[in-house]
Image: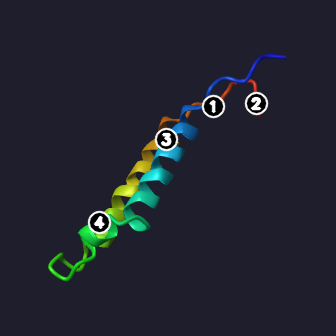
Amino acid sequence: MMPPSPNKSSDWSLVTAFLLVLVFVSPFTSLWSHGEMSWYAPYMIWLGIVILIAISSFTGHRDDGEA
């Protein structure tokens, strides 16, 4: 049996999850949620996170031995 290979897409997923928590749950929320920011600022942040998730899913590799 072959040892499992490291999965880089799970690393990207963890980084993305950390950024999501950092931006939306931490005190950094006050940086983008105050009234002077444009109404679409949270949507741009979500778009950036969705793009990171898409990049991480496309850069992930699949093992040839798995079905």
* Secondary structure found at label 4: helix
Which amino acid does the dot numbered 4 rest on? Met
Q: Residues within 10 Å of mark 2 (few under 14, many from 20)?
A: few
Residue of label 1 = 62
Residue 6 picture location, percent across and down: 62, 26
Q: Residues within 10 Å of mark 3 (few under 14, many from 20)?
A: some
Residue 44 badge = 4
Residue 34 picture location, percent across and down: 23, 78
Q: Nearer the viewer, residue 4 or 27?
A: 27
Mark 2–mark 1 Cα distance, whole angstroms, equals 8 Å
Q: Quadrant of residue 46?
A: bottom left
Residue 50, visible in the rendered structure? no
Residue of label 2 = 66
Query: Where is the C terminus found, in terms of image quarters?
Result: top right
Which amino acid does the dot numbered 3 rest on? Trp
Residue 55, above or below 35 = above
Mark 3 and mark 1 lie on one chain; the one further toward the N terminus is 3
User: Is residue 53 toward the left or the right of residue 39 in the image?
Assistant: right
Residue 13, above or below 2 = below
Mark in the foreground, 2 or 3: 3
